[in-house]
Image: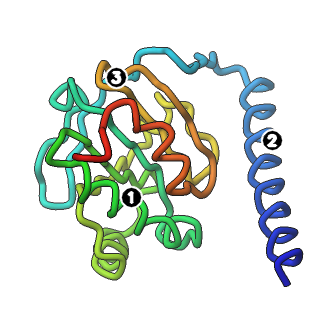
Amino acid sequence: MLFAQLEKTMIKRLLCISLLLFSMLSAACSQEKVTKLRIGDQAPAFTLQDLEGKTMRLSDMKGSPVLLRFFLTDCKYCRADTPVFNDFYTRYHANGLQVLYIDSLGTNLKVVEAFVKELGILFPVAQDKGGAVSSSYMVRALPQTIVLDPDHNIIAAILGSVSEAELTQLLSPYFSEKS
């Protein structure tokens, strides 16, 4: 049974990787100029409205590590690992951690609100209706998590599900376990 679960996980990851590679190939073949983001690059600035209408600017989060999660409401990975994001937000928000879920597909607002309520999301959720933020971060497949250091340099881009161990490893330089 464990082998079957691992096999399914590997197949899903391979499918996500294949979709990402297809997206990258499609972008490379298009006439459109593609700017590449790399680990260590400064994160692109953005301004979005959260579901309560509050303006969310990346610049307002300067000095704090940031988790940007580009999500889908019908994504099983998003549903499965939202408790991990909630847990990290609860543990480290008082020490500066910022978490922002971003719907870049322009999903119906009521669907997004139901997703937030059902999963008990504790942090801001915003809609990137035109997809400008997703485009500036080169998001080609969902879900994708972008991890920023306090200076807002990109330290990781994770495609698919995110584990507690991954976030712990990435964020441990910024938060002690005593926090």
Could you give the CA–CA distance between mark 2 and mark 1, rounded to whole angstroms?
28 Å
Residue in view at x 40 percent, y 37 percent: 172
98 w.r.t. 13: above or below: above
Query: Circle 1: is it few (<14), some (14-19), or many (20+) Cα within 10 Å?
Result: many
Q: Nearer the viewer, residue 77 or 44?
A: 77
Could you give the CA–CA distance between mark 1 and mark 3, rounded to whole angstroms?
19 Å
109 w.r.t. 137: above or below: below
Residue in view at x 77 percent, y 66 percent: 9
Q: Left or right of 43: which side holds 138?
A: right
Could you give the CA–CA distance between mark 2 and mark 3, rounded to whole angstroms?
28 Å
Disc 2 target residue: 22
Disc 3 target residue: 152
Image quadrant containing the N terminus: bottom right
Residue in view at x 73 percent, y 43 percent: 20
Q: Left or right of 164: which side holds 133?
A: left
Query: Circle 2: is it few (<14), some (14-19), or many (20+) Cα within 10 Å?
Result: some
24 w.r.t. 81: above or below: above
Q: Nearer the viewer's eye, disc 2 or disc 3?
A: 3
Asked which secondary structure carries label 2, the reply is helix
Q: Left or right of 168: which side holds 95?
A: left
Q: Mark 2 touching mark 3, by CB under 8 A?
A: no
